[in-house]
Image (cartoon, rainbow, N blue to C red):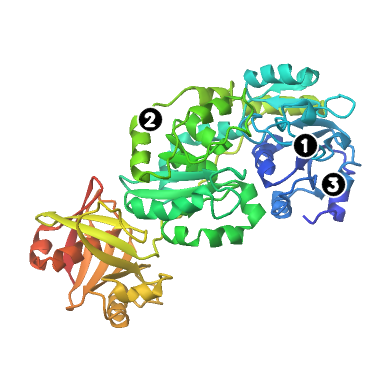
Amino acid sequence: MPVGDDSARWATRGRSLKVLLVVHNVTSATRLLDIMPLFDDDFRVQLLVTCTESSAFRSGVEELLAGTGVPVLPWEQAVETPVSLAVSASFGGQLRSILGHLIVLSHGIGYSKRLATPDSGSTEAPAPVFGMSPEWLLDERGIPVVDTLVLSHPEQYERLRDVCPEAQPTAALAGDPCWDRMLAALPYRSRFRRTLGLRGGQRLVLLNSTWNPESLFGDGGGDDVLPSLLPRLASEFPADEYRFAAVLHPNIWHGHGPGQIRAWLDRAQRAGLALIDPLHGWRQALIAADAVIGDHGSVTYYAAALGTPVLLGAAPLVGLAPDAPVHDFVRDAPRLDPALPLRIQLERVVRDHRPRPEPAEFISSVPGESATRLRRLFYDALGIPEPDEPALLEPLPLPPYEPPSHTVPLLVLTRLLGAGEIEVTRYAGPHPPADSTGELHTAAHEDTRETHQLALADVVFRYGEPDDARFGSPEQWTTEALSLHPQCAMTAYVSAPGDCTVRTRDGELLSLHAESGADADPSSYASALYAWLAAGKSLDELIAQGLTVRTGGVAHRATVTRR
């Protein structure tokens, strides 16, 4: 709804009790989206939404507010409109100007980061803890800015009592709705993994960065950790054994612009990196992950709370409250050493991982209860009875299907292990690890951006529906592709998760079909077949006994049939 339109003004004059959701930026809005369903089905309540316009990261907010579908009030109108309840997930802006009961909840892991107030100016003293210090909690008269400060664990209450006793009476323990939604979604982990195209035996490694200049992504400069890691991840980790995904803080997305982020990470995406939606998909990806390379942000701490192995690629302590649990976690968690091979470090962390109870304990002392407790707080402030139905949060949605798309040329190492058995190790980086062994060939997706490398490819492949009219048919495309790419020895059309049509340079048309339980990318079957034939082995022998493709420690069986 357009900001300030007549329907928004009409909504402020209705007879319903008005609840104002106060947004600072996309990051804080995510927590408000968590709690909006707590007002569903109640005709006594009219939701309104506004933006304080106080954050430096306002890009994307207008679209997000419009997407809520509730009336949007300009800030100037919002502070002049009496409301029964205002809910914010951040500080900043003139919150004290709101005419109504103000409840503030955290949009991250409790209150653990230092952040200077807008009027603090330059100072040598450490910045105050955001949401847990007099500078943020009290006005110039020493009166609490908020009527209710939501905490998720008693340790936050103890810190509040020590650092700002004046705000202690405003504290209320109500858990963490973001964490509760993740806990409720844990049974669907396998679905979230399939959403990202995870295959049997593959590990999902999640790269996570908060928005601090010292974070994993940093400020977008050339010295940042993540950009230097990406080409190494593609070169050191086999594409069929590892899947990588990146969860970047919304301020990174909207500070630099989504188009710029995609441009910076273009090659990484074409090498198989999944860029996760920072608003709706990060929790599902976190649940699906087998390991996390992160920093001092909340997502990394949530990962540790889920029991996921964590390796810190950036770990600044100076910006964290020294008495917050996150500080202890960052201080003690394993560190990534960029000077050493990455795969060895990651596999060691996974192998030696022993989940610690503290992260889950300190996220919420009342897991699963945030909906009930928060709605009770909201309706007490409204002064009306709660609805009769139980308070419920929305389940995490199943994200769109996003399988890996390796459109950079793949360097393929193969070894013949026995009768019809070939080991295939594919890398999406510019070169394989120095200790790699085997026969090397190149497999390239026909849509690769590196078109000059198509002339060097031994295998040219693509994915598509078997009846895609643009390619005629798998049989037609394989013939046409051999003509278009006369240097390659084989073309392969993957038409289903377990099916691949192959045509060799000497005219053989073959079908490769995965047997029950096989779960490899069929284009890897084509590379295995190429290696077999390049070694002078008999095609008839392979047709008779079948093909076994080993990726990592997993064996995949496929039948080979002449067409």
Position in image of residue 109 (x %, y %): 61, 31
Whether residue 276 is situated above or below residue 31 in the rendered picture? below
Q: How crowded is mark 2: few (under 14 residues within 10 Å), some or many (20 or more)?
A: some
Q: Residue 526 carries which label?
A: none
Which quadrant of the figure has residue 371? top right
Left or right: residue 355 compared with residue 438: right
Task: Please report the residue visible at 44 percent of the width from the left and 34 percent of the height from the top.
Answer: 308
Q: Count of labels shown?
A: 3
Question: Looking at the figure, which quarter contains the C terminus?
Answer: bottom left
Question: Looking at the figure, which quarter contains the N terminus?
Answer: bottom right
| First along the sequence among labels 1 and 2 | 1
Task: Please report the residue visible at 9 percent of the width from the left and 55 percent of the height from the top.
Answer: 419
| First along the sequence among labels 2 and 3 | 3
Q: Name the residue under label 2.
A: 353
Gap between marks 2 and 3, in whole Å? 48 Å
Position in image of residue 101 (x %, y %): 83, 30
Q: Mark 1 points at which residue?
A: 117
Q: Label 1 amino acid?
A: Thr
| First along the sequence among labels 3 and 1 | 3
Left or right: residue 18 compared with residue 319: right
Which quadrant of the figure has residue 421? bottom left
Q: Can residue 195 be seen in this view?
A: yes
Task: Please report the residue visible at 33 percent of the width from the left and 65 percent of the height from the top.
Answer: 495
Task: Please report the residue visible at 54 percent of the width from the left and 50 percent of the height from the top.
Answer: 224
Position in image of residue 349 (x %, y %): 38, 34
Q: Name the residue under label 3.
A: 75
Gap between marks 3 and 1, in whole Å? 20 Å
Mark 3 secondary-structure assignment: helix
Which quadrant of the figure has residue 83? top right
Whether residue 557 is situated above or below residue 325 in the rendered picture? below
